[in-house]
Image: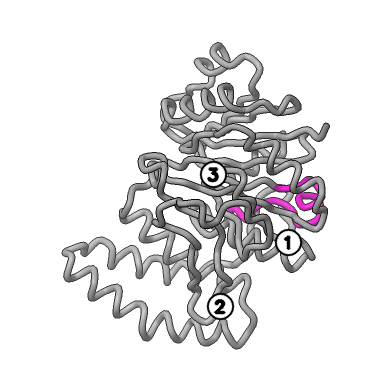
Protein backbone atom coordinates (compact mmCIF):
# COMPACT_ATOMS: atom_id res chain seq x y z
CA UNK A 1 0.00 0.00 0.00
CA UNK A 2 1.34 3.43 -0.96
CA UNK A 3 1.88 5.81 1.94
CA UNK A 4 0.09 9.18 1.89
CA UNK A 5 1.31 12.28 3.72
CA UNK A 6 -1.56 14.67 4.53
CA UNK A 7 -0.15 18.18 4.95
CA UNK A 8 -1.95 21.27 6.21
CA UNK A 9 -0.80 24.72 7.33
CA UNK A 10 -2.21 26.65 10.29
CA UNK A 11 -1.99 30.39 10.83
CA UNK A 12 -3.87 31.76 13.86
CA UNK A 13 -6.79 29.35 13.37
CA UNK A 14 -6.51 26.67 16.04
CA UNK A 15 -10.21 25.76 16.04
CA UNK A 16 -10.44 25.70 12.23
CA UNK A 17 -7.47 23.34 12.08
CA UNK A 18 -9.00 21.26 14.89
CA UNK A 19 -12.13 20.82 12.76
CA UNK A 20 -10.05 19.53 9.86
CA UNK A 21 -8.05 17.12 12.01
CA UNK A 22 -11.21 15.76 13.59
CA UNK A 23 -12.73 15.22 10.14
CA UNK A 24 -9.63 13.29 9.09
CA UNK A 25 -9.97 11.06 12.15
CA UNK A 26 -13.68 10.58 11.44
CA UNK A 27 -13.66 9.95 7.70
CA UNK A 28 -10.20 8.76 6.65
CA UNK A 29 -9.99 4.97 6.45
CA UNK A 30 -6.81 4.79 4.38
CA UNK A 31 -4.38 3.08 6.76
CA UNK A 32 -0.98 4.15 5.42
CA UNK A 33 -1.15 7.84 6.25
CA UNK A 34 0.85 10.38 8.18
CA UNK A 35 -0.68 13.73 9.14
CA UNK A 36 1.64 16.75 9.17
CA UNK A 37 0.52 20.12 10.58
CA UNK A 38 2.73 23.16 10.02
CA UNK A 39 2.11 26.08 12.35
CA UNK A 40 3.09 29.03 10.20
CA UNK A 41 4.26 31.60 12.74
CA UNK A 42 0.94 31.91 14.59
CA UNK A 43 0.77 34.46 17.40
CA UNK A 44 -0.03 31.64 19.82
CA UNK A 45 1.81 28.34 19.44
CA UNK A 46 -0.89 25.64 19.54
CA UNK A 47 1.48 22.74 18.99
CA UNK A 48 1.73 21.69 22.69
CA UNK A 49 -2.08 21.49 22.78
CA UNK A 50 -2.22 19.50 19.54
CA UNK A 51 0.58 17.14 20.52
CA UNK A 52 -1.39 16.15 23.60
CA UNK A 53 -4.64 15.77 21.67
CA UNK A 54 -3.28 14.13 18.49
CA UNK A 55 -0.33 12.07 19.68
CA UNK A 56 0.17 10.24 16.37
CA UNK A 57 0.37 13.36 14.20
CA UNK A 58 3.50 15.31 13.23
CA UNK A 59 3.68 19.01 14.14
CA UNK A 60 6.18 21.52 12.81
CA UNK A 61 6.55 25.08 14.06
CA UNK A 62 7.86 27.95 11.95
CA UNK A 63 8.64 31.03 13.99
CA UNK A 64 7.61 33.29 11.11
CA UNK A 65 4.85 33.24 8.53
CA UNK A 66 6.31 31.71 5.36
CA UNK A 67 3.12 32.10 3.34
CA UNK A 68 1.01 29.35 1.79
CA UNK A 69 3.78 27.89 -0.35
CA UNK A 70 6.52 28.22 2.27
CA UNK A 71 4.42 26.58 4.97
CA UNK A 72 3.47 23.70 2.71
CA UNK A 73 7.08 23.33 1.61
CA UNK A 74 8.12 22.79 5.24
CA UNK A 75 5.61 19.97 5.43
CA UNK A 76 6.74 18.49 2.11
CA UNK A 77 10.37 18.41 3.27
CA UNK A 78 9.33 16.36 6.32
CA UNK A 79 6.91 14.06 4.48
CA UNK A 80 7.77 10.42 3.81
CA UNK A 81 4.73 9.48 1.70
CA UNK A 82 4.66 8.21 -1.88
CA UNK A 83 1.77 10.64 -2.39
CA UNK A 84 1.39 13.99 -0.63
CA UNK A 85 -2.08 15.47 -0.08
CA UNK A 86 -1.92 19.23 0.53
CA UNK A 87 -5.14 20.55 2.03
CA UNK A 88 -6.17 23.92 3.39
CA UNK A 89 -6.82 23.89 7.10
CA UNK A 90 -10.32 25.20 6.34
CA UNK A 91 -11.40 22.02 4.57
CA UNK A 92 -13.42 19.06 5.84
CA UNK A 93 -12.79 15.49 4.70
CA UNK A 94 -15.35 13.07 3.28
CA UNK A 95 -15.40 9.28 3.13
CA UNK A 96 -13.07 7.52 0.66
CA UNK A 97 -11.37 10.78 -0.30
CA UNK A 98 -7.81 9.48 0.01
CA UNK A 99 -8.52 6.04 -1.47
CA UNK A 100 -10.15 7.50 -4.57
CA UNK A 101 -7.31 9.90 -5.35
CA UNK A 102 -4.58 7.36 -4.61
CA UNK A 103 -6.15 4.78 -6.91
CA UNK A 104 -6.27 7.29 -9.76
CA UNK A 105 -2.64 8.29 -9.31
CA UNK A 106 -1.51 4.67 -8.96
CA UNK A 107 -3.13 3.68 -12.25
CA UNK A 108 -2.26 6.83 -14.21
CA UNK A 109 1.45 7.43 -13.68
CA UNK A 110 1.51 10.36 -16.12
CA UNK A 111 -0.47 12.44 -13.60
CA UNK A 112 1.58 14.67 -11.28
CA UNK A 113 -1.22 16.53 -9.46
CA UNK A 114 -4.87 15.66 -8.87
CA UNK A 115 -7.69 17.49 -7.07
CA UNK A 116 -11.07 16.29 -5.83
CA UNK A 117 -14.39 18.04 -6.35
CA UNK A 118 -14.73 21.02 -3.98
CA UNK A 119 -18.04 22.05 -2.41
CA UNK A 120 -18.80 25.04 -0.21
CA UNK A 121 -18.98 24.00 3.43
CA UNK A 122 -21.79 26.40 4.31
CA UNK A 123 -23.73 25.40 1.20
CA UNK A 124 -22.84 21.73 0.75
CA UNK A 125 -24.95 21.30 -2.37
CA UNK A 126 -23.12 24.14 -4.17
CA UNK A 127 -20.00 23.44 -6.22
CA UNK A 128 -16.82 25.44 -5.88
CA UNK A 129 -14.53 23.53 -8.27
CA UNK A 130 -14.67 20.70 -10.76
CA UNK A 131 -11.68 21.84 -12.81
CA UNK A 132 -10.22 24.93 -14.46
CA UNK A 133 -10.24 26.13 -18.04
CA UNK A 134 -6.94 26.87 -19.77
CA UNK A 135 -5.19 30.13 -18.94
CA UNK A 136 -5.32 33.06 -21.34
CA UNK A 137 -1.73 34.27 -20.99
CA UNK A 138 -2.54 37.54 -22.76
CA UNK A 139 -4.88 38.59 -19.94
CA UNK A 140 -3.99 36.13 -17.10
CA UNK A 141 -7.60 35.02 -16.91
CA UNK A 142 -9.28 31.62 -16.80
CA UNK A 143 -12.45 30.18 -15.26
CA UNK A 144 -13.27 27.78 -12.47
CA UNK A 145 -15.58 25.13 -13.91
CA UNK A 146 -18.80 24.50 -12.00
CA UNK A 147 -18.37 27.29 -9.46
CA UNK A 148 -21.65 28.37 -7.79
CA UNK A 149 -23.65 25.69 -9.61
CA UNK A 150 -26.02 23.44 -7.66
CA UNK A 151 -24.51 19.95 -7.55
CA UNK A 152 -27.11 17.88 -9.34
CA UNK A 153 -24.61 15.24 -10.39
CA UNK A 154 -23.84 16.96 -13.69
CA UNK A 155 -20.09 16.44 -13.18
CA UNK A 156 -20.23 13.07 -11.43
CA UNK A 157 -17.66 10.40 -12.29
CA UNK A 158 -15.45 12.69 -14.35
CA UNK A 159 -11.86 11.49 -14.10
CA UNK A 160 -9.41 13.21 -16.37
CA UNK A 161 -7.41 16.25 -17.37
CA UNK A 162 -7.95 19.79 -16.16
CA UNK A 163 -5.85 22.88 -16.74
CA UNK A 164 -5.06 23.49 -13.07
CA UNK A 165 -5.50 21.84 -9.68
CA UNK A 166 -7.17 23.68 -6.80
CA UNK A 167 -4.80 24.82 -4.08
CA UNK A 168 -7.27 24.02 -1.31
CA UNK A 169 -6.91 20.28 -1.98
CA UNK A 170 -4.35 18.70 -4.28
CA UNK A 171 -2.54 15.38 -4.14
CA UNK A 172 0.90 15.16 -5.75
CA UNK A 173 3.21 12.26 -6.45
CA UNK A 174 6.71 11.79 -5.09
CA UNK A 175 7.94 11.48 -8.69
CA UNK A 176 6.50 14.92 -9.41
CA UNK A 177 8.20 16.47 -6.36
CA UNK A 178 11.53 14.87 -7.25
CA UNK A 179 11.43 16.22 -10.79
CA UNK A 180 9.72 19.60 -10.45
CA UNK A 181 10.62 20.60 -6.89
CA UNK A 182 8.75 22.57 -4.26
CA UNK A 183 6.19 25.33 -4.67
CA UNK A 184 7.62 28.77 -5.40
CA UNK A 185 7.40 30.56 -2.06
CA UNK A 186 8.00 33.90 -3.77
CA UNK A 187 4.22 34.09 -4.32
CA UNK A 188 3.55 33.92 -0.55
CA UNK A 189 -0.22 33.95 -1.09
CA UNK A 190 -2.28 33.14 -4.24
CA UNK A 191 -1.24 31.83 -7.66
CA UNK A 192 1.42 29.45 -6.31
CA UNK A 193 -0.59 26.34 -7.26
CA UNK A 194 -1.17 27.69 -10.78
CA UNK A 195 2.57 28.25 -11.14
CA UNK A 196 3.24 24.72 -9.81
CA UNK A 197 0.81 23.24 -12.35
CA UNK A 198 2.43 25.11 -15.22
CA UNK A 199 5.83 23.83 -14.13
CA UNK A 200 4.37 20.33 -13.90
CA UNK A 201 3.05 20.48 -17.46
CA UNK A 202 6.38 21.75 -18.79
CA UNK A 203 8.03 18.78 -17.07
CA UNK A 204 5.69 16.33 -18.83
CA UNK A 205 3.11 15.71 -16.08
CA UNK A 206 -0.65 15.98 -16.43
CA UNK A 207 -3.09 17.70 -14.06
CA UNK A 208 -6.27 15.76 -13.30
CA UNK A 209 -9.48 15.94 -11.31
CA UNK A 210 -11.54 13.05 -9.96
CA UNK A 211 -15.08 14.15 -9.07
CA UNK A 212 -15.73 10.82 -7.34
CA UNK A 213 -13.67 12.31 -4.50
CA UNK A 214 -14.98 15.40 -2.74
CA UNK A 215 -14.01 17.79 0.03
CA UNK A 216 -15.79 20.70 1.70
CA UNK A 217 -14.13 24.12 1.79
CA UNK A 218 -14.73 27.02 4.17
CA UNK A 219 -13.79 29.63 1.58
CA UNK A 220 -11.66 32.66 2.48
CA UNK A 221 -11.42 32.28 6.25
CA UNK A 222 -7.73 33.30 6.32
CA UNK A 223 -7.87 36.60 4.42
CA UNK A 224 -11.55 37.42 3.96
CA UNK A 225 -13.74 37.86 0.93
CA UNK A 226 -12.09 41.19 0.12
CA UNK A 227 -9.24 42.93 1.90
CA UNK A 228 -6.24 45.14 1.23
CA UNK A 229 -3.97 42.14 1.77
CA UNK A 230 -5.86 40.07 -0.77
CA UNK A 231 -5.97 42.93 -3.26
CA UNK A 232 -2.21 43.37 -3.03
CA UNK A 233 -1.25 39.73 -3.49
CA UNK A 234 -3.84 39.00 -6.17
CA UNK A 235 -2.52 41.85 -8.31
CA UNK A 236 1.14 41.31 -7.49
CA UNK A 237 1.01 37.59 -8.17
CA UNK A 238 -1.12 37.84 -11.28
CA UNK A 239 1.73 39.83 -12.82
CA UNK A 240 4.36 37.53 -11.32
CA UNK A 241 2.63 34.44 -12.69
CA UNK A 242 2.79 35.83 -16.22
CA UNK A 243 6.41 36.89 -15.78
CA UNK A 244 7.31 33.32 -14.79
CA UNK A 245 5.13 31.32 -17.17
CA UNK A 246 4.15 33.22 -20.32
CA UNK A 247 6.17 33.29 -23.52
CA UNK A 248 7.50 36.60 -24.86
CA UNK A 249 4.58 37.81 -27.01
CA UNK A 250 1.76 37.09 -24.51
CA UNK A 251 3.93 38.53 -21.74
CA UNK A 252 4.45 41.83 -23.57
CA UNK A 253 0.75 42.03 -24.46
CA UNK A 254 -0.22 41.36 -20.83
CA UNK A 255 2.01 44.15 -19.49
CA UNK A 256 0.42 46.61 -21.91
CA UNK A 257 -3.09 45.33 -21.10
CA UNK A 258 -2.56 45.49 -17.33
CA UNK A 259 -1.10 49.03 -17.27
CA UNK A 260 -3.39 50.60 -19.88
CA UNK A 261 -6.70 48.87 -19.11
CA UNK A 262 -6.70 46.95 -15.82
CA UNK A 263 -5.01 49.57 -13.62
CA UNK A 264 -7.27 52.54 -14.57
CA UNK A 265 -10.36 50.32 -14.37
CA UNK A 266 -9.43 49.09 -10.89
CA UNK A 267 -8.53 52.56 -9.69
CA UNK A 268 -11.91 53.87 -10.78
CA UNK A 269 -13.62 50.96 -9.04
CA UNK A 270 -11.72 51.66 -5.81
CA UNK A 271 -12.73 55.33 -5.92
CA UNK A 272 -16.40 54.47 -6.44
CA UNK A 273 -16.29 52.08 -3.47
CA UNK A 274 -14.29 54.53 -1.30
CA UNK A 275 -11.58 51.90 -0.96
CA UNK A 276 -8.71 54.36 -1.27
CA UNK A 277 -6.25 52.04 0.47
CA UNK A 278 -6.72 49.51 -2.34
CA UNK A 279 -5.29 52.02 -4.82
CA UNK A 280 -2.09 52.06 -2.79
CA UNK A 281 -1.99 48.26 -2.75
CA UNK A 282 -2.31 48.10 -6.54
CA UNK A 283 0.57 50.55 -7.01
CA UNK A 284 2.64 48.52 -4.52
CA UNK A 285 1.87 45.33 -6.45
CA UNK A 286 3.04 46.84 -9.75
CA UNK A 287 6.14 48.41 -8.18
CA UNK A 288 7.11 45.11 -6.57
CA UNK A 289 7.24 43.44 -9.98
CA UNK A 290 9.49 46.16 -11.36
CA UNK A 291 11.95 45.77 -8.49
CA UNK A 292 12.01 42.02 -7.74
CA UNK A 293 13.24 38.91 -9.50
CA UNK A 294 10.93 36.03 -10.46
CA UNK A 295 13.14 33.50 -8.67
CA UNK A 296 12.18 31.78 -5.45
CA UNK A 297 14.73 31.37 -2.67
CA UNK A 298 13.26 28.52 -0.64
CA UNK A 299 15.66 25.73 0.27
CA UNK A 300 15.30 22.88 -2.20
CA UNK A 301 13.43 24.90 -4.81
CA UNK A 302 14.16 24.05 -8.43
CA UNK A 303 13.47 26.84 -10.95
Please say if 163 is above or below 299: below
What percent of the width, then of the height, locates residue 82? 79, 39
Label 2 residue SS: loop
Residue under circle 2? 137
Residue at left offset 55%, top offset 34%: 94
Residue under circle 3? 66
Which quadrant of the figure has residue 97? top right
Residue at left offset 55%, top offset 11%: 52
Quadrant into which the C terminus falls = bottom right
| Magenta segment boundaries in residue numbering | 172-185
User: Label for residue 179?
Assistant: none
Give me the C-alpha separation between circle 2 and circle 1: 19 Å
Please say if 54 is above or below 235: above
- Is tag 1's residue or tag 3's residue first in the polypeptide sequence? 3
How would you rate the neighbour count of disc 2 (Cα within 10 Å): few for under 14, some for 14-19, many for 20 or more? some
Residue under circle 1? 206
What percent of the width, then of the height, locates residue 56? 66, 17
Amino acid sequence: MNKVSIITVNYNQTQVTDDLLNSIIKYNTYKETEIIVVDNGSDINSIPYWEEKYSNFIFIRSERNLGFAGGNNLGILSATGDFLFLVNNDTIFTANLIETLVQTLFINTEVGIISPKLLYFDQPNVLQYVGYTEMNYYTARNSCIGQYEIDNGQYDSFIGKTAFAHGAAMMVTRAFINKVGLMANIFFLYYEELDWCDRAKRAGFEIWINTNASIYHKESISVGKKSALKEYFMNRNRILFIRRNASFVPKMFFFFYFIIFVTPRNMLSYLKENNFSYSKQLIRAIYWNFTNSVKSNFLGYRP
